Image (tube, rainbow, N blue to C red):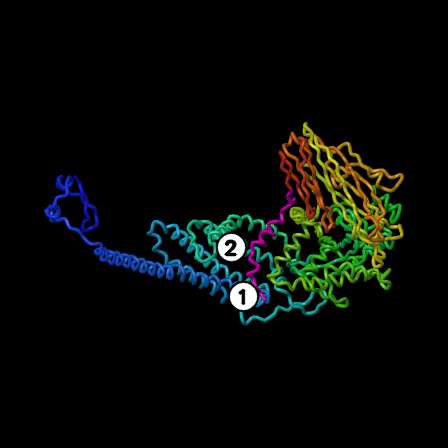
Amino acid sequence: MKTFKFTKNKKIEETTVNPTLTNSFSPNLGNELSSLDSKTKYVSFKSETKPKRKRGRKLLIVLSILFVLTAILGVLAYNYVYMPYTRIKKSVDDIQVNASSLLADFDNKDLSKIDTYFANIKTDLNNVNSEIDRFEFLENLEYTKGYYDNFQVMRTVLDKTSNLLDSTLPDLKNLLKITGFKTEKSDPNTVIVLDPETGEKKEDSAFSLVMKELPQYLALYSKIEPQVIDIFNEVKKIDPNYVPQIGGTNYAEIIKEVDDFSTKFPSISKQTMDFLSHMPEIIGSNDPATYLVILQNETEMRASGGLLSAFGTLTMSNGEIGDINLEDMWNLETHVSYDLGVDVGYRNIYGQLVLMERGCGAYYLRAQDAGIYPDLKLTMQMLADYYNVANYYSPADFPSYNYVLIINNHFAETLIDLLDPLEVEGFGTVTSDKLYDLIKSQTDSVENRGSKERKSIIKDIANAAKKKLFEFKIADLARLINAMVGSIQAKDIGIYAPNDSSLEAYLEKYGFSGETAKTFEGDYFQLSEAQNCALKINRWLRNDVTQTVNIDDNGNISKSVYTHWVQPEIYQDSYLDQYDMSGRFTYRAWVRYFMPTGSTNVVSDGYNNSGYLYYYPDEYQDAQMQKYVSDNIIQFDSRRGSAEAPIPESQLNVSYNLPDNLNYNATGSYKLLIQKHPGKSWGEKNTVIINHEGQEYKVEFILDRDKVITYRDGIISVDNYNKSLDFIINLVNEVPWDKINTD
């Protein structure tokens, strides 16, 4: 039999007991039990206190070791992570401070501390490099070698950056000195030159100084560009998996962004240099550039964006604009047609001819009405023909020019908004939202009626604006660049170079010329609206366009285009001469739908909306635009006398079939280019509906610039057309402007 007993270690042990003990209670049981193995002992539970004390000591030892290890790790982290991070961050912050100070001095044209700034930046780079030296031990550890490799990449980047600073500074200082900047303390404090037009002394802005020598600055950049690209290529070698996380900053994400930019940089650099290649000619670097200026007034809508309201000349020299001379367009028309008696040869055509002969014009095309195409380049060419006649016979009053510049009222508003507040002598503060009203009140005033100086206020505002424009600082560049690029893409501004084919190709490439696309592999649409004899009603009248595209089982494509006009404004007495309530100048517009050459079965309800008994819509191939055209007139009573009166409206519907070469089944997709009407600064609401295989696909957007609609297999998308200048906006957005403080 087996029995169990407690041992010293509280373990239950087994031993053999006399079997007779199990059968009876022997009176000698106590003796018999005592005769068991003498090595077996019974222990009291009090013996447990001693092991507890020993176990506590062990726990204390473990905690002590952990504390020591933690302290060691803390010291290591402090010395090898936190302190290096703190010192590196201080160096980086110092670099930023020196760079900001350099930019501030640039605005002030005093770069006499440039050596100090560059020396400080180089010292900070060396300090960062020294901090990296502290991590050499990471090379020998399996799990830290990736960090070591990254540190070596950074070392190379810092070394190459430092070398670039050393090699570039002498050339940069020399160029800055030639340009006119103060680069030594002994240099004059300011650069004073004589104004070429007035002979008065004036101080050039920092921007003007750089623009004067822009070709040399571009040459210097071309020289160092390979080194810059090489530095970015080194940055791409950093492994984001071995970027330490310190504090709340996601350095891995920052490295990824830098790596992405490094990948794009060679392309961006090339695009930038290509874009700047003709800029010296445009801004008059070294040789002044004279422009024939054309102003449009889109409150009197024309095909090219607005009535050609004023003209004049300006000269750009080293990026700065000289005095702007502007006159009423009637002065040019009167001088050519009546004083000189010259027939330039242009005539009103189609719907515009009908409207002009029945209300406010004639067979002959006046200079102010020369914008008969929704193509800024054609408009500039046609107006230049009138001006060239005047220049030939009267060069003193109509001086020669190199290039043509066309701008509308919205561009002027955009510019003044950038310069707000703008003080104009004799008129006080001019704001963008009151610009039109101010100009209108002056040009229509009794004392100015019939005067050749009727629109001199435009000249006064323009000269005040250009003076303030070139006082901008580096921190203002982002807003200025965005505004200028946006104006080009919206066709609020255009440039034409009549005698320079290379420059003209450049202007067309980047969309400066506002030209209609002559070739496009797909469907095409452009709405051209030219109101005639309706005063300034386009100030309030708006429209939207809906295109419905039907693709049949055989891939043939038919379309219907619906345009809807509304005029919600209620008449006020202050609108006199802008908004007619007599019925003489209700809304009349020459409206054309431009579509692909080869379109067929054109059907229009223009006759019902024309208001003329004997006018019928026309269709033809336009040689200038190289498009097929549905030519129409719309007319409706645009008057609204009270809030209770219904909103006046009109519409135009045109349907047609696309040419066979655009068959959906043959091409595998449907593409549509919609070009924006110049001058419609508000942007038309556009809707495209595609019916295909029993399903309807719809997209809506604002036509703020030319758009391309693509449809394929049930997916419809909208993208911008001619994105050649988008890289500039993207590049501007990459710059941390919030970190640049030049005040």
The amino acid at mark 1 is Ser
Using the rendered image of the protein, determine whether residue 343 is visible from the camera's viewpoint: no
In the image, 459: left or right of 1? right
Q: What residue did someone put label 1 on?
A: 101
Secondary structure state at the residue bearing disc 1: helix
Toward which corner of the image does residue 476 lie, by quadrant?
A: bottom right
Q: Which mark is residue 224?
A: 2
Question: Could you tell me residue 300's position as x and y percent?
Answer: 80, 51
Question: Which stretch is magenta?
Answer: 718-743
The amino acid at mark 2 is Ile
493 lies above or below 740: above
Quarter of the image with the C terminus in it: bottom right
126 lies above or below 495: below
Q: Residue at x 37, y 57 (%)?
A: 135
The mark that comes first in sequence, 1 or 2, is 1
Q: 550 or 229, which lies in front? A: 550
Q: 51 or 335, which lies in front? A: 51
Q: Nearer the viewer, mark 1 or mark 2?
A: 1
Badge 2 density bin: few <14, some 14–19, many ≥20, Cα 10 Å: few
Q: Residue at x 23, y 57 (%)?
A: 49
**Residue 285: within the magenta?**
no
Question: Could you tell me residue 579's position as x and y percent?
Answer: 84, 54
Q: 216 or 704, which lies in front? A: 704
